[in-house]
Image (cartoon, rainbow, N blue to C red):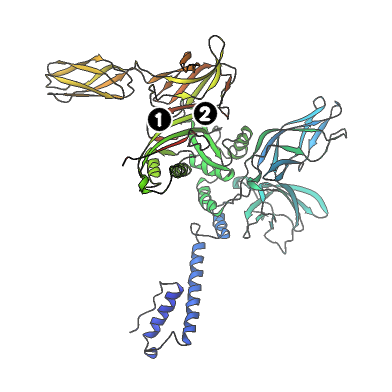
């Protein structure tokens, strides 16, 4: 009996061979030469047809599920079943102080109309247009009209009018012809007919509970051609528009992220006040650079966000609710961290803390933070729960790597190896750091460094220091709190906390180039040893103290076979960690050392012409090694010497696995020459 066709092998060649094998087993085709006959063409046709059908059905099956769909139309359609509409391009928003100078001081008002435009400074050779989205009116003060915080949006404001015909468009769907539409700026108005000038403004549908059969709302969706569409209700959920109505749609056509950081603007038109004066003398001061722009949501982003949107149901209750909702409505963020006020120290109940890292900058402006709270969070948040947006705090990692390598096992020069190691470190940073809730692992970094050339690199050792950067208050005695958020290593003479240089006055009023350093706690030893378990059966015992200091010794006091106390004979020095071991002819005794202090002292010093250290202030603050908090008191900084005008504090971490918490971001600053230092030495052969 002939074998059946194998239907699980679906590529062209296999299909043809299977057909050929099947026919060769038939008595009619015994010893038939298929390859040399015309029947081979028919087999090709059958194989092609089968292959086409298999491919088509496979793609149909893929497109039937959100996880495997590839076409944007399919993904958008699946997302619609979750009640999810992909976000469009977002226009960057800048905030300016706009002053119009009048030739008189007569009382009047001035209105900047919707659509009034400004030309931004060029970015990559292109000057982008920014517009005002709503009429804004101010009253003259003296001879000036001052618009204090005027939001302007990048893009071109366009308006389209659609005539509705019940016969040709029964579903009342209108396609917006621009692919760059910013859907957050859409305004819709409906005129009953071309002969009736009464106009009604429709708002965008957001919540089902707020909508009835008479609600004047419009709905938004992405169409199958990638263009956005608006549509209206059918007198069940939302009011139906009448036959012959004229639908007017106004919105911004944006360039997305192209105009991010624009920071110079020129008004493009004259304005006329209520007295009829034409004003052309304008002053534009930038309050906040353009920010918040985004490209339209990609297919992969829709796949990720749509199920989360369904889970949250447009509510803001849990941490995940906030994360998914903010990401959807403010897509220009690179990383996001949410935590409750109960996790603060001290706790702040009834508050949600949010930290955002934008894609194109380090921080979000205060104006943009308030807009996110007012327009995105508050409409969905639970009553009595306040939201606060905090800037991310960057914790910089400084790496000093020593490499031993065998030059006989590589053709690469030392410079080439250094560049390769630097690239490996930056790749590790881009993969594992530069975001909230990240973890730095020295062992993983060492693997990446050693993996640059496994044949030539014999081994490596990396010293890790941490760095915080603050903006100092100049010419005023100020208190500072710098929180590293991780345990810190107590300093020694050669390895301690130091700051970058700044200028300050000494006790005699002379201006010095100074820095802050940790005072090595040479007097810090073992204060005492507490007996935790007296044990039994002891006639003699040896007390051994181990730790990161030197010189501490102690002896046990024994009574009736039990160790009743341990007496210090030498407190030693430089201890920040220590353990006690008791050996002897007894059993079970244990003890715990009490170290003098886990809080260090900071001082301000400068170096004289002979490079001798001179002390300006012997106690300017403290450092808590367990909590990583540095406190500086009454420091009057006149100026700082770094290029970015920040004050740097650097210290070694206590641990080699460093986790970021709350609004801390771990990163490595590739622009700082002190961040990545690589020393390569050949082994002796």
Q: Residue furthest right?
A: 276
The quadrant in which the N terminus is found is bottom left
Task: Tell me what residue is drawn at x 53 percent, y 12 percent.
Answer: 506
Q: Is residue 132 visible?
A: no
User: Which percent across, then down, holds residue 284?
Assistant: 74, 33
Task: Tell me what residue is drawn at x 54 percent, y 37 percent.
Answer: 356
Quick check: 561 left or right of 243? Answer: left
Numbered label tally:
2
User: Which percent across, then down, holds residue 181?
Assistant: 67, 50
Task: Tell me what residue is drawn at x 14 percent, y 25 percent.
Answer: 587
Quadrant of the rendered structure where residue 230 is? bottom right
User: Cα distance, mark 1 to mark 2?
Assistant: 16 Å
User: Which percent across, then down, holds residue 373?
Assistant: 59, 36
State the residue position of label 2. Answer: 469
Task: Identify the disc placed on residue 653.
Answer: 1
Mark 2, secondary structure of its residue: strand
């Amino acid at each position: 009996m002939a074998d059946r066709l194998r239907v699980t092998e679906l590529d062209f060649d296999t299909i043809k061979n299977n057909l050929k094998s099947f026919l060769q087993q038939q008595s009619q085709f015994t010893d038939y030469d298929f390859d040399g006959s015309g029947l081979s063409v028919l087999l090709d046709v059958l194989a092609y047809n089968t292959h086409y059908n298999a491919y088509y059905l496979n793609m149909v099956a893929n497109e039937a599920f959100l996880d495997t769909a590839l076409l944007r139309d399919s993904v958008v359609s699946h997302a619609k079943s979750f009640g999810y509409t992909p976000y469009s391009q977002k226009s960057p928003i800048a905030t300016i102080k706009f002053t119009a100078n009048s030739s008189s001081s007569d009382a009047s008002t001035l209105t900047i109309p919707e659509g009034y435009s400004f030309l931004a400074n060029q970015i990559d050779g292109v000057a982008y247009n920014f517009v005002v989205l709503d009429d804004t009116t101010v009253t003259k003060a003296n001879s000036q009209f001052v618009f204090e915080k005027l939001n302007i949006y990048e893009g071109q404001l366009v308006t389209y009018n659609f005539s509705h015909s019940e016969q040709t468009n029964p579903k009342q769907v209108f396609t917006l012809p621009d692919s760059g539409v910013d859907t957050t700026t859409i305004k819709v108005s409906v005129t009953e007919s071309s002969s009736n000038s009464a106009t009604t403004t429709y708002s965008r549908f957001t919540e089902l509970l707020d909508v009835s059969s008479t609600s004047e709302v419009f709905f938004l969706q992405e169409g199958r051609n990638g263009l956005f569409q608006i549509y209206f209700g059918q007198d069940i959920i939302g009011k139906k528009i009448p036959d012959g109505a004229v639908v007017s749609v106004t919105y911004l056509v944006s360039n997305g992220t192209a105009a991010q950081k624009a920071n110079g603007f020129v008004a493009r038109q004259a304005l006329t006040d209520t007295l009829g004066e034409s004003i052309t003398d304008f002053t534009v001061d930038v309050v906040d650079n353009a920010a918040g722009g985004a490209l339209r949501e990609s297919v992969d982003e829709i796949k990720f966000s749509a199920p989360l949107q369904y889970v949250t149901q447009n509510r803001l209750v849990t941490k995940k609710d906030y994360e998914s909702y903010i990401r959807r409505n403010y897509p220009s963020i690179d990383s996001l961290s949410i935590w409750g006020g109960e996790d603060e120290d001290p706790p702040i109940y009834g508050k949600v803390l949010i930290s955002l890292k934008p894609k194109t900058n380090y921080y979000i402006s205060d104006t943009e933070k308030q807009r996110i709270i007012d327009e995105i969070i508050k409409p969905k948040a639970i009553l009595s729960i306040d939201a606060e947006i905090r800037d991310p705090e960057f914790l910089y990692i400084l790496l000093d790597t020593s490499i031993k390598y065998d030059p006989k096992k590589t053709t690469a020069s030392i410079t080439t190896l250094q560049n390769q190691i630097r690239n490996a470190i930056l790749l590790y940073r881009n993969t594992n750091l530069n975001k909230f809730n990240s973890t730095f692992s020295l062992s993983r970094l060492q693997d990446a460094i050693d993996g640059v050339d496994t044949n030539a690199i014999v081994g490596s050792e990396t010293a890790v220091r941490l760095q915080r950067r603050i903006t100092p208050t100049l010419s005023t005695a100020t208190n500072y709190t710098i929180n590293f958020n991780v345990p810190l290593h107590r300093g020694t003479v050669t390895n301690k906390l130091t700051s970058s240089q700044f200028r300050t006055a000494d006790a005699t009023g002379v201006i010095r180039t100074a820095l802050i350093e940790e005072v090595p706690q040479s007097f810090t030893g073992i204060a005492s040893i507490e007996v935790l378990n007296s044990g039994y059966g002891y006639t003699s015992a040896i007390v051994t103290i181990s730790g990161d200091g030197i010189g501490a010794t102690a002896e046990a006091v024994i009574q009736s076979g039990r160790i009743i106390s341990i007496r210090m004979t030498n407190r030693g020095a430089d201890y920040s960690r220590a353990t006690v071991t008791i050996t002897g002819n007894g059993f079970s005794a244990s003890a715990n050392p009490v170290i003098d202090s886990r809080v260090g002292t900071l001082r301000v010093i400068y170096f004289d012409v002979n490079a001798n250290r001179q002390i300006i202030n012997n106690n300017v603050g403290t450092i808590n090694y367990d909590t990583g908090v540095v406190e500086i008191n009454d420091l009057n900084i006149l100026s700082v010497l770094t290029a970015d005008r920040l004050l740097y504090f650097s210290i070694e971490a206590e641990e080699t696995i460093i986790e970021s918490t709350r609004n801390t971001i771990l990163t490595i600053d590739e622009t700082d020459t002190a961040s990545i230092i690589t020393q390569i030495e050949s082994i002796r052969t």
